[in-house]
Amino acid sequence: MAKIVRELPGLALTPEDISQRKVLSTSWVPKAEYAWDAGIAMGRYLEELRNGRLMGVRHRRCGRTVIPPRIFCEQCFAPMDEWGELPDTGTVNTFSICYVSWDVKRLEVPEIPAVIEIDGTSPRVGILHKLGEVDPQQVKVGMPVKAVWKPAEERNGAITDILYFQPI
Amino acid sequence: MQKQMAIVGVGYSGFSSISPGLSYKELMYEAAVRAYQDAGIDPRQDADGFVTVAEDFHEGTSIFDEYVPDQLGAVMRPVHTVTGDGIHGLIAGALKILSGAMNIVVVEGHSKASNILTLSQVTAYALDPIYNRPLGLNPYSIAGLEMQRFLHQTKNTVEQCARVVVKNRRNALNHPSAGHGSDISLEDVLASERVASPLRKLDIAPHSDGCVVFVLASADAARDLTPQPIWIRGMGWSNGSYSLEQRNWAHADYARQAAQMAYHQAGVEKPHDEIDFAEIDDTFSYKELQHMEALELCGEGEAGRMIDEGATQPGGSLPINVSGGSLGVGNLLEASGLQRVLEVVLQLRGQASARQLKNVETGLAFAWRGLPTASGAALVLSR
């Protein structure tokens, strides 16, 4: 308890004071649900993930090959539509060892989020995913990795059709 | 204001009930490419800044403004997002030019209303959480309350409101991009199902997806870019009290004040005589009549008579919502105001094809921010 609170007379507010409505409050659970149209670029990317393939888009004018695909070049604003399959291998650009889950629970086995620079992109760009089957202490920037896919019958056209990337 | 800044490029994509073929980013890209082509600019070289309008709860993404730059050609450029109607954003962009800080500014607004599965609950989330939300009322009831008081006080009628729906839905048939044109009768509107009496289903503008992009320029830049700049002559906006308990339920005070600000700048003294046509909020049928009176396009209680006499039809003395308005084009969420400005620009340029009005010099666009707000923004434009 902070020093100022110890020195002041009075009672601290407890969660029970609120749940027993000694202190009045109002609560509201939002119902906000969305279904985003995947459109051209995301739609084909997700479709090919279901097929176990990583697709990129090459921009003829500026020579870049990017993943995830997009229909426009954010640098020169021209359309991008030369699609090509990329290997499911790459190298670790950066990583973290995360001991807290997305909904703020302590994890016994940490997660390893990483940005994987996919082979064949130019200049090299990556996708955000996780690493698996690796001792967290052994992960290094620049480490070569390969995708581990869900079994074909379980894939449903989502980024989670890749379970994780593992070192090769 | 005398010819200090102008709209020099317009581009749009949509407007339809659903748009599964394009992601919101691709929808924005499509409209932006057209606007830059129309203005003859390269956004990567020529645009000094970008303004977009968006509400995180409509997008389903927090801090949505971060998802804006790439598809507008705005990466590593000055960008800011306004949470308000598109006309609020357009005014923010115009002020950057008026301040002398920028010469060319891009303004964008879009709707992917079809992607919001619980739009009614998202709208309800805009209500006061302590005083109003616990009652669990559908937000359309607020429109019902307002319509009731407006009709009671002005003696306009539900039939006159229904006539607005018939007019705007039919107008939309002449607008190839409008999503909700139809040839319906007064009886169809009056027989449609009750939603929040006196408001019926067809009194409510259905939603559409779409995107509108404008390129604004200073006077010098505008004259360099186009032989046909559309000048921003006056702009005004006003925010009423959020209190549902204390607001003026009969009259749109926010519209009156926003318009007076814009008219004053434009030197418009008699709106009914000096405004040739208007694109004004008709999110609900009665809103067109209520806004006509607040915008001083007619006197109090006279809007109904004008629709009865056909004055606001495309061939009338003061055409209103020739585009079809929200009732005919669709409610485009934050982009609604930009669609109204778009129609004013196309009409003033003489590019409105089958619905082109003759001899129009000055037009008014007015946007209401939608339920449950009492806020609006007005723009006076001329050739």
Image: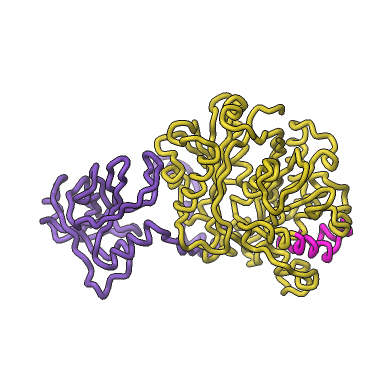
Chain colours: A purple, B yellow
- Identify the residue shown where x is 57% and y is 61%: B16
Q: Residue at x 24, y 49 (%)?
A: A115
Left or right of A57, for residue B122? right
Instruction: Assign the magenta stretch its main secondary structure.
Output: helix
Looking at the image, residue B3 sits to the left or right of residue A132; the answer is right
Observer able to see residue B242: no
x and y, in percent, of residue B335 in the image:
59, 50
Q: Quadrant of the C terminus of chain B?
A: top right
Q: Is residue B157 magenta?
A: yes
Residue A156 at least partly seen: yes
Q: Position of residue B173 (x, y in %)?
A: 68, 61
Task: Residue B198: name its quadrant.
Answer: bottom right
Q: Nearer the viewer, residue B36 or A52?
A: B36
The quadrant in which the N terminus of chain B is found is: top right
Residue drawn at 73 percent across, 36 percent down: B262
Query: How many discs appear?
Result: 0
Camera-side residue of B63 and B180: B180
Residue B374 inside the magenta-drawn segment: no
Say whether residue B365 is left or right of residue A40: right
Give the residues in magenta.
B142-167
**Where is residue A49, by image quadrant?**
bottom left
* Residue in the image at 47% along x and 45% along y: B65
x and y percent of residue B296 in the render?
A: 83, 44
